[in-house]
Amino acid sequence: MSKSLFIETLGCAMNTRDSEHMIAQLQEKEGYEITQEVREADLILINTCSVREKPVQKLFSELGVFNKKKKPSAKIGVCGCTASHLGDEIIKRAPYVSFVLGARNVSKITEVLHKDKAVEIDINYDESQFAFDDFRSSPYKAYINISIGCDKKCTFCIVPKTRGEEISIPNNLILQEAQRAVNKGAKEVFLLGQNVNNYGRRFSGNEEKINFTELLRRLSKIEGLERIRFTSPHPFHMDDEFIEEFAKNPKICKSMHMPLQSGSTEILKAMKRGYTKEWFIDRVNKLRKECPEVSISTDIIVAFPGESDEDFADTIDVMKQVRFDQIFSFKYSPRPETEAQYLPEIDPEIASDRLSYLQALHTEILDEIQATSLGKEYRVYFEELIRDGYVSGRSDNNLVIKVKGSEELLGEFRDVKITAIGRTILTGEILA
Ligand code: SAH
Ligand code: F3S
């Protein structure tokens, strides 16, 4: 009889891919099958995020719930970034946890499974060329790692301490993986790294050194591959060559994530982001000039230590100038092992007010942007059946669009005219 695996994935797209890698190893080497029921599972995995404090607190309450629900013989493993930074403290606080597996050690899942109380969290472990078995949660879109770790030292960010130094994956392995996904029917690849446009700086062996722009060129030659997305690029590394390739290569989706973090040059300096307000706006202008249809998303942190009213006003100014299509916004959360952790924090009420103000402003901007979509036509790649007889997919510029329809649309492209707008999803009709 096969064994069953329940896996919960928190955090970013890199965690999603790490979970797919662990599922692949457990299916192929250990005969596990996925279940959605904690009560049925023989193995329960939580793939954690530690970028802010909240998900860490949530981990321990969830572990308690899983422990109550689980079969007596079932094992619980904690993986991912919180595993990397808390290590054996997790087993001290929750002694029923069987093993702890760091974000840089996922290939060892089949080893730790058989060692009680194993803690594998070495952030120098090099998995950049590990040949994972094949598992993808979607047959239509393939997540592909192009690098592991992060070499930046943003003073608020714990990721370099949980995922280690940045190592690029050799381009031939990436191309092979993309080809394999296309052979299995995927028409879209989603390239992943903490800092994708820094690709090619360091490899673990003597690999051919190419940069991100060249990697994009090579990938786009794969026949049958129709769309290329990636996250996250860093504004500092957005040179002209990259922006021009992005604009003119028809296979690259016209949606760019540009994590701003703050609009104040002073705060950007304190964050060690490596660019100024002016550079960021200059890059947006260059991008919009080369590629007017591009949609731009961003990440913003409010109330970083020392953020004055003037600094926050700079962030609002960038918001108004750029008019982002999507924002992910957060209150600053001090994290262990980061340079900013001991800096005096901003009054929490001010922080909350700033976040609300920023989000309300973005809702206004978004409503205006969405209103202009009505009646427009987009080419949509359909990926998911949703409720009430609808199928959803994305436009090239990352709008989520649903139409009436069923399975036969999945994995297909159609031209769609927008008939109704909403904040998170647009409704449309397929054009003949
Ligand atoms: N390299 C990745 C960053 C991963 S962290 C990227 O560019 O997307 C994802 C986002 O979480 C960051 O962009 C930042 O906006 C936010 N974040 C990271 N550390 C944080 C902290 N200490 N407090 C609040 N938000 C944080
Ligand atoms: Fe974090 Fe900055 Fe790297 S946000 S993941 S240290 S680019």
Image: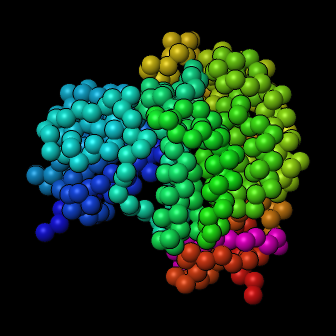
Image quadrant in which the N terminus is located:
bottom left
Q: Is residue 390 above or below residue 306?
A: below
Taking the image as four quarters, which one is ligand 2 found in?
top right
- Kindly identify the residue that appears in the image at 57 percent across and 41 percent down: 208
Residue 388: percent from the left, percent from the top?
54, 78
Farthest bottom residue in view: 432
- Kindly identify the residue that appears in the image at 50 percent across and 35 percent down: 206
Task: Read off the magenta span.
Answer: 375-389
Residue 376: percent from the left, percent from the top?
82, 70
Q: 147 or 94, which lies in front?
A: 147
Residue 199: percent from the left, percent from the top?
60, 39
Q: Is residue 364 visible?
A: no
Q: How is the image coloured?
A: rainbow
Residue 44: percent from the left, percent from the top?
25, 51
- Kindly identify the residue that appears in the image at 50 percent across and 48 percent down: 145
Lateral position of residue 308 relative to residue 176, left or right:
right
Q: Is residue 35 visible?
A: yes
Farthest right residue in view: 289
Q: Is residue 105 magenta?
A: no
Magenta-colored segment: predominant secondary structure:
strand
Hey, which quadrant is residue 409 in on the image?
Answer: bottom right
Q: 263 or 282, which lies in front?
A: 282
